[in-house]
Image (cartoon, rainbow, N blue to C red):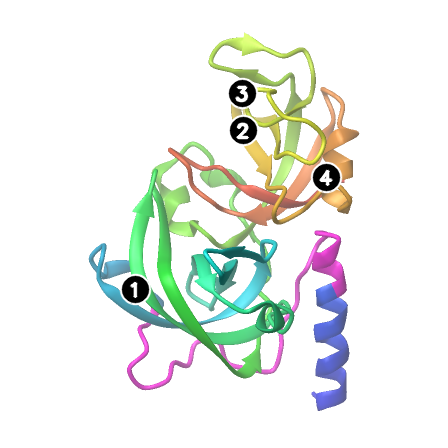
Amino acid sequence: MKKSLILVLALTLALTFAGCGNASGSGKDDPGVKSEGVMTYAEYAAAALDTEVTIEAYVQAHQSWWEKDGVGKLTVYAQDKDGGYYIYEMNCSKEDSEKLVPGTKIKVTGYKGEWAGEVEILDANFEILEGSYIAEPVDVSTYLGLDDLADYQNRFVAFKGMTVETYVKDGQSYDTAFVYNDDNSGERGSDLYFNVSLNGATYTFCVESHLCDENSDVYKAVENLKVGDVVDLEGFLYWYNGANPHITSVTVK
C-alpha cells in the first residue's frame, strides 16, 4: 500500500470518528509484532494489578482532551490483534492529542488498575511509533449474558439484531427509549443510556458524551430511537459492574 493511500485512509478514519460512525479495515503494520521489552496482550492480561506495564497498541478512538492540574489528559481506546486496552487519562499535550487519529501506533507505560470491573492503564505516558492498524468489530452478540463476554473487554465489538426496549433502571420505567444519564438526571450533552434486548434478556448500553458528543451521528441516532426498533450496534466494550458498552454506531434495520 502506498504511503499516500495510507495517509488518505488515516484522514478518512479521523473524520469518521469525529462523527462517531463506523470504522473498520486494516493498515500497513503487523499488530501481532511487539518490540523488545513490550508485553504481549496475554502477558498484560496476566499481570497483577498495581504493577507497571508496557504495551504497544493502536489508537481506535479517544475521548475529548482536557487539562487536570495543568497537565493534559486523554482517555484512549486502543487495540492490537489479541485484545483491547483502556488507557485512562493518559498524560498528553493538546498538540499530541491531535496526532492520535484512529490507527496510530503508540507505546504506553503505566500501571495496571481496575475500577468496578474495568481493567485499565493508569498514570500512563506514551510515545508515537511507526505503524497503522484499525480493528474490525467482533460480533459478540452470542456472548451477552455469559462470562465469556469479559474476554472481549475494551475491544471494538458489534451487537446484531438488538431490539430497543423502554428504558428501565432499578425497576423504575422511564416510558422512553433513552435517558440523559442513567437515572434521567441529565440533559442534552450528557451521557445517553438506552436498553436493548436479545433472546428475552435486556441490556443497558451507553453513548459516552466525551467520546461521542451531542453533535455526533450516533448521539442523534439514539435520540431518534423508538421502542421496538431493531438495531445493529458497534462500540467499545467498556465495563462498569458488568458490560457497559460505549456505543459509536447505531444502524436501524
Specify the label residue 161 is tagged with: none
Q: Furthest-front residue in view?
A: 70
Residue count near mark 3 (Cα–Cα under 10 Å), binned few <14, some 14–19, many ≥20:
few
Residue count near mark 4 (Cα–Cα under 10 Å), binned few <14, some 14–19, many ≥20:
many
Mark nearer the viewer, 1 or 3:
1
Determine the image quadrant of residue 88.
Answer: bottom left
Q: CA distance from mark 4 to mark 1?
A: 33 Å
What is the chief secondary structure element of the magenta stretch?
loop
Residue count near mark 2 (Cα–Cα under 10 Å), binned few <14, some 14–19, many ≥20:
some
Examine the rendering and report whether any part of residue 8 can be seen. yes
The spot of residue 205 in percent (x, y) is 56, 33
Q: Nearer the viewer, residue 229 or 188?
A: 188
Q: Amino acid at mark 1?
A: Tyr
55 to the left or right of 19: left
Question: Residue 35: within the magenta?
Answer: yes
226 to the left or right of 41: right
Q: Amino acid at mark 4?
A: Tyr
Query: Quick check: 134 above or below 29?
Result: above
Residue carrying label 4: 219
Query: Quick check: 205 above or below 138?
Result: above
Residue carrying label 2: 204
Q: Amino acid at mark 2?
A: Thr
Residue carrying label 1: 44
Residues shaded magenta: 15-40
Query: Quick check: 184 above or below 123?
Result: above
First in sequence: mark 1 or mark 2?
A: 1
Residue ID at (34%, 38%): 116
First in sequence: mark 4 or mark 1?
A: 1
Q: CA distance from mark 1 to mark 3?
A: 35 Å
241 to the left or right of 101: left
The spot of residue 162 in percent (x, y) is 63, 32
Mark nearer the viewer, 4 or 1:
4
